[in-house]
Image: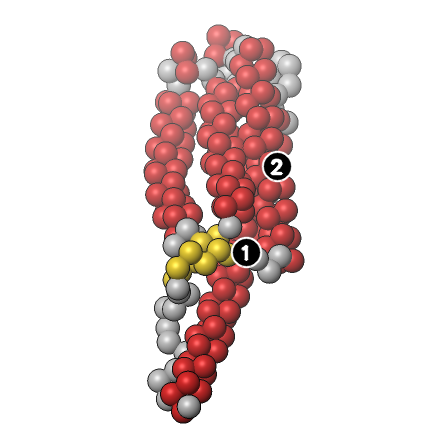
Amino acid sequence: MFLEREEVLTIKARQLHEDERKKKIKENLKSGLDDLVNVNSLLSIAVFVGLSYATPGQRSLENRPECDAEPRQAKNLVVLEVVAFSFFLFSSLVAKSLKVNVQLDEENFEIYKPGKARLTSWKWVFLILSVLASFLGCFFLMLSMFYLIQIRLGRLSCKSPYTQGATLLMTAIVCVGMLIYLPLVFLALRKTLNLDLTTTQPSGEGQ
């Protein structure tokens, strides 16, 4: 009888601990979604800054007529900026919707074996869509910056050291950032499919 009571208390303590772990993971997920929305908002500002330079008759700072950008380059800038903004907006809308659902829904995790859980399938898919859309927004924003650099500093065909330097520096920095971003985000997304609910033992379990 005593053993049965102790076993029941142990099960209740373990269940309480798992509920606390779920709550903590839930808060971390909401915080991550907020950070994603904030990053998208900051990058969207760069989109509108770029659009302000897509006006007819823009002269480059190189001050040579042959270095001035063609209307086609300004059009490409607008198209890429709009595409980038669309991805950022999509990512933010999905992230905000997912955060609201995570907050209101009690069934955020699926227990697939004792002490192990994963984010529900459809929420995991929407999380991936939000992250992927943000990444694609960054990619198209980088492409648009190529045209913005040529509009302001002169076309690449003019071989201006300022244009070449800005282009190479931007490409290197953004590519390194993406190479860091993708693996870390991939690991985080993979972790949501194998959440450990028993990382630490509840204080009363061994008593």
Closer-to-camera residue (147/188):
188
- Residue at far front of view: 1
Q: Which of marks 1 and 2 is in front?
A: 1
Q: Is residue 200 above or below residue 185?
A: below
Closer-to-camera residue (89/190):
190
Name the residue: 61% across, 36% down.
89
- Residue at far bottom of view: 2
The reply to whether dot 1 and dot 2 touch (C-beta < 8 Å) is no
Measured as percent of width and height from the top left, residue 190 is found at 39, 48
Measured as percent of width and height from the top left, residue 115 is found at 39, 65
Measured as percent of width and height from the top left, residue 4 is found at 41, 85
Measured as percent of width and height from the top left, residue 60 is found at 53, 18
Res. 89 mark = 2
Q: In this view, does 92 lie to the left or right of 198?
A: right
Q: In this view, does 134 lie above or below 65?
A: below
Name the residue: 40% across, 32% down.
170
Give the mark nearest the N terminus, 1 or 2.
Answer: 2
Q: In this view, does 158 lie above or below 91?
A: above
What residue type is disc 2 on? Answer: Leu
The residue tagged 1 is 108
Name the residue: 40% across, 91% down.
2
Q: In this view, does 96 lie to the left or right of 2?
A: right
